[in-house]
Amino acid sequence: MELRNFGAVIKFALEVEAMAAAFYETANAITKNQQLKSSFETFMQMRMTRMELLKRLRRENTTEMILEPISGLNSEKFRPKTECPEGCPDKKLIELAVSMENLNSAFYIVAAKKIEFLIEPADIFEQMAEENLEYTKQLEKFG
Amino acid sequence: MKGEVVKNYINGRWVESKSKETRDVISPTTGELLARTPMSTAEEAQEAIEAAKTAYERWRSTPAQTRIRYLYRFRNLLEDYFEELSKTITMEHGKIIDESRGEYRRAVENVEAAASIPTLQMGYNFEDIAAGIDEMVIKQPLGVFFCVAPFNFPGMVPTWFWPFAIACGNTYIVKPSEQVPLSQIRQFELIDKVGFPKGVMNLVNGGPEVVNALIKSPDTVGMSFVGSTPIGKLLYKKCGEHGKRAQVQAGAKNFITVMPDANIERTVPNLMSSFFGNTGQRCLSGAVLLAVGEVYNPLKVAVVNAAKELVIGNGLNEDVQMGPIATKAALKRVLGYIETGIKEGAELILDGRNVKIPDYPKGLFIGPNIFDKVTPEMTIAKEEIFGPVMSIIHVKDLDEAIDIIHANTYGNASSVFTSSGKIARDYQYRVRAGNIGINIGIVAPIATFPFSGMKDSFFGDLHGQGKDAVDFFTENKVVITRWF
């Protein structure tokens, strides 16, 4: 689906964060590795914090002067696959997480460009993209 | 709330109107009855005036720092209930949710700006105007003010006025639009929660009877109005007859000029927002597109293609870009203007009539409409349509564009799209409109600037928002002192 408004972009970002939080919650329940469990728990909390941040961005940055249509941003390209079946091995969980983080990062990089007329949200999207890559590095250490 | 008669808020409590006459508040999206607005009586307006008058002396003596703490609390409640308030606007007016959020953001900004009153309301003084004699100006509040609010920004427009008015020490009465009272009802629930001293803030629903009572009362001081030019002119005259201050922000016909050197890629999305945002129901909406010289053909193609892409539907859906028109009467009026445009020889190159949104058969939907080959004499080029209709006029140069703009009676806003600093400067210097945009389609002043307007778009001296608001809601008292 094409994201045509700032509100639609934020709505999708909230979906992405909610999916990630749900993924880490499930992964946390599946893994037996205590260190990995702890990381998943941290990542889940981070995603919840980011959801609050996104809601604040939407509340504080929508002004009528800049309500211009956005084009060329399709959400389906950035919708991650986050299903982790029960008993999924740690290696697979990490693979899924890394793939999701990379895709999330790509979304925030592209979306930041599309909303560059909104300085604070664009900057925070870029920051989130960097955070996603940082999470990837942390996850890869478990591999 | 569905179908209920909304209440008035007088002297710190919610009261039912005694009037049996009501007006239905209909969702423009679903067609369902949301509520009913009572056409309150002159006596009820008088009760609000009495409450505000009684509260005034105590409120004006309350230190400004204390007064603004009420505003801080109100501001925080606006943030807490931001999404819900925004949804209320979309529900009763139809505009898309992002536009409602934008509207509330500006409301919050106005409250924040008014909270600067301890600085803004400062007077000034000068020592030794003669030997041993000093002179000063004190900016004093005046009493009971009121606003008559429009339907197109039901959450924001009253905040152009009342936060400044009460921060200065006045007391206030809001008369919301009878078409869309719910946003103000919700705001007043928060005002009630804040716990302002009773009588400082009042709300009276209704129509002309209430407005006439507010104007004629010897106990009110001034009126802020936003609405159409015919009604605005009438009320401005009445205010004059009754010795009231008045700031009347009226209708508009906004001309947007695009020069051949404009960045088309950046300009077109801006034009979409300007002409079709809020379904064209802004007093800052673009109405006539003046395409200068060789930009005419490529611009025409680009705007039609972009307008075709706009998604129309229920404004609560985040993916929708254009909601319905607010009322049946407004839709009928817009359709009438489109018919007139066709009859007068303009070419309808994008026809937004007959748009059907499957899930909302009763919705008052209309798509973007674009007329080509419009001439300045045509009705659609002169009169305020207040709907999603773009009229394109091909002009040879900037001078011709400005002549057309100046021939129109309105002067609310006008924008130019250009990459030339010289043209931009010429435009802001020469064009007689209150709000000028340079590569900006919606020239919406922030809360610390006045919402300007000229010609038939504004009657009065001082505008809403910013320092103008402070001057409107205060009187400069001069004091000259000598001590023996």
Image (cartoon, coloured by chain):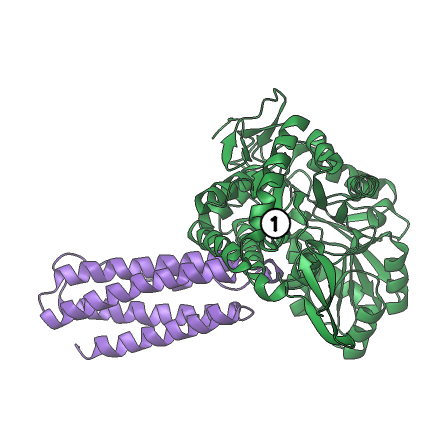
Q: Is residue A140 left or right of residue B394?
A: left
- In-image side of B192 versus B165 (left or right): left
User: Is B467 left or right of B358, judged from the image as shown?
Assistant: right
Left or right: where A114 falls relative to B449: left
- Give amino acid for label 1: Trp
**Image quarter of the C terminus of chain B:** bottom right
Question: Does residue B195 lie above or below B27 as drawn?
Answer: below
Q: Which chain is purple?
A: A
Q: Which chain is green?
A: B
Residue A57: quarter of image: bottom left
Residue A88 locus on image (x, y percent): 14, 62
What is the secondary structure assignment of the residue under circle 1?
Answer: helix
- Say which residue appears at 75% left-offset and 35% top-offset: B216
Does residue B276 lie above or below B116 as drawn? above
Q: Quadrant of residue B113?
A: bottom right
Which residue was labeled with disc 1?
Answer: B162
**Is B303 or B34 nearer to us in this picture?**
B34
Disc 1: which chain? Answer: B
Q: Residue B450 location in percent, x, y?
A: 69, 60
Residue at screen point 61% across, 44% down = B172
Q: Around disc 1, counting alpha carbons within 10 Å, would you say few (fewer than 14), some (14 to 19), or many (20 or more)?
A: many
Q: Observer-nearest residue: B268 or B118?
A: B118
Between B363 and B105, the one nearer to me in the picture = B105
Can you give x and y, in whole percent of width and height, for residue B367 in the image? 65, 45
Q: Residue furthest front?
A: B484
Q: Judge whether residue B249 can be spotted in this image.
A: no
Q: Is residue B113 visible?
A: yes
| Percent position of residue B397, x then y | 88, 68
